[in-house]
Image (cartoon, helix red, strand yellow):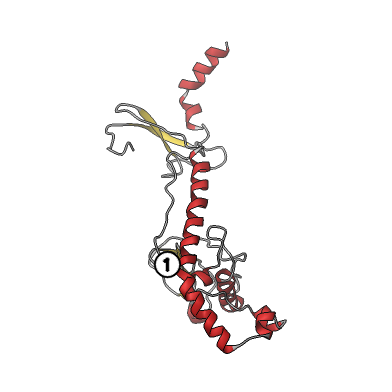
Amino acid sequence: MYNDATERVRVCQEYQQHAPVSKAPWHSMTPITSPCPFCKWAINIVGPFPSGVGNADFLVVTIDFFTKWVKAKPVNKITSKKNAIFRLGKHRLPIRHSKRDNELPKVLWEHWTTSKHSTSETPFILVYGSEAVLPAEIAILAERILWFSQDQNSEDLRTNLDLLEKRRKMAATHEAIIKQRIARYYDKRVRLITYAVGDLVWRDNQASRFKDTDNLGPNWERLFKVIRISKTGT
């Protein structure tokens, strides 16, 4: 009886239409790296927000792959329909434009001066070679503020610039190790799927919204026949 029920479920099209979508990845991870600072950038769009100064409804956010340096600029018009939420530092930008315009520089500053797990360095030090002086250090008269010397500071800056390339190489090595660990963990969950010409396959209903996708709607839509296999196997 169990075997009969299993076989019945296996060939039942209604069951297959409502079968859960596997969350396991289908391909191995390919870590994205950058050989040097400001060589490769990622760009994203944040918004829309209620109109701010200059009727700016969106933020264009870019981040450098190597240093994790982030730049953001308010814009009032975009040509892409893509909408995304981009987390900067530990905060989300406030919805009210009066606060958002004032908080953006603070959020960017926090990101620049916060050590990143992937590089174990702050973006600021990987760009300029020296660590930034924080407003809190000025307020409490930290040791390097209290005993500041212009001549010694100039010498330290030159020394830091001489050591900057070495620091960047160490950060790149640390990042490569971290990404290898993440890739190994990710690849353990990869579920390889192969197809042959003539196979019948279902298409994810989320791809075209062919049918209603509420809680009781089907997860898969219509059967398609494989007529050709590309050289990459997809």
Q: Is residue 38 visible?
A: yes
- Farthest residue to the right: give it: 140
The kind of residue tagged 1 is: Pro
Q: Is residue 21 left or right of residue 94?
A: left
* 80 versus 102 height, above or below: above
Q: Is residue 72 visible?
A: no
Question: Residue 201 in the image: x percent, y percent?
Answer: 38, 31
Quarter of the image with the C terminus is top left
* 150 versus 51 height, above or below: below
Element type where label 1 sits in the image = loop
The one nearer the camera, 51 or 176, is 176
Question: Residue 200 in the image: x percent, y percent?
Answer: 36, 28
Q: Is residue 225 left or right of residue 178?
A: left
Question: Residue 15 in the image: x percent, y percent?
Answer: 51, 27
The one nearer the camera, 45 or 106, is 106
Q: Is residue 113 left or right of residue 43?
A: right
| Residue for badge 1 | 37
